[in-house]
């Protein structure tokens, strides 16, 4: 059994230690907010926080995160930054299809958790690798800036 600290709760899984965290979250624990996009850590749809850092869960073996704090989109709004990002996402009307949004929100929240006044360059670096097929990048940037203002 592998014990995981997910969203502040201790959960156990008997998954093979090499199973990607994404599949444990989705298939074994029923947390379907993190999405499968590419399976190669290139698109960002599967992003979760591991000890506060935005991390791609589709290639991360579940055994590698035992004992670490895992935060998923299901509880990101429990933090001030996560709540601000989600509210800004709505205010800026960011989602179109919505498929990438959990990963986008997780990356934006990780950024604002450590940098309350990000520059455009900071946003570009933090959001690199989060692909939006609907191309809502202008609204994503506006939402991140709005969330930063609300946290100031």
Image (cartoon, rainbow, N blue to C red):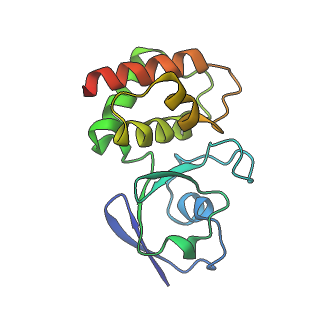
94 over 9 or under it: above or below: above
66 over 121 or under it: above or below: below
Please name the residue shown 42% across and 68% down the image: 68
Q: Find the residue positioned furthest to the bottom.
A: 1
Is residue 12 something one can see in this rendering? yes
Check the picture and name the quadrant holding the C terminus: top left
Please name the residue shown 47% across and 75% down the image: 66
Question: Is 104 left or right of 83, judged from the image as shown?
Answer: right
Is residue 94 something one can see in this rendering? no
Question: Is 127 left or right of 37, judged from the image as shown?
Answer: left
Question: Is 23 left or right of 118, judged from the image as shown?
Answer: right
Quadrant in the rendering for residue 89: top left
In the image shown, does 118 or 78 lie closer to the viewer?
118
Quadrant in the rendering for residue 91: top left
In the image shown, does 5 or 27 lie closer to the viewer?
5
Quadrant in the rendering for residue 64: bottom right
16 over 58 or under it: above or below: below
In the image shown, does 123 or 93 lie closer to the viewer?
123
Percent x, y of residue 42: 71, 45
Percent x, y of residue 73: 45, 45
Please name the residue shown 57% across and 57% down the image: 26
62 over 147 or under it: above or below: below
Percent x, y of residue 48: 50, 51
């Amino acid at each position: 059994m592998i014990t995981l600290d997910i969203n502040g709760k201790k959960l156990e899984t008997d998954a093979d230690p090499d199973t990607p965290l994404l599949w444990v979250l989705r298939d074994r624990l029923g947390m379907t907010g993190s999405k499968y996009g590419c399976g190669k850590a290139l698109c960002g749809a599967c992003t979760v926080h591991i000890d506060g850092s935005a991390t791609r869960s589709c290639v991360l073996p579940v055994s590698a995160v035992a004992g670490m704090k895992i935060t998923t989109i299901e509880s990101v709004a429990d933090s001030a930054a996560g709540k601000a990002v989600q509210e800004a996402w709505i205010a800026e009307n960011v989602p179109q299809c919505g498929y990438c949004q959990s990963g986008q929100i997780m990356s934006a929240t990780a950024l604002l958790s450590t940098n309350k006044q990000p520059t455009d360059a900071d946003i570009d670096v933090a959001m690199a690798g989060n692909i939006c097929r609907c191309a809502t990048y202008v609204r994503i940037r506006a939402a991140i800036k709005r969330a930063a203002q609300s946290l100031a």
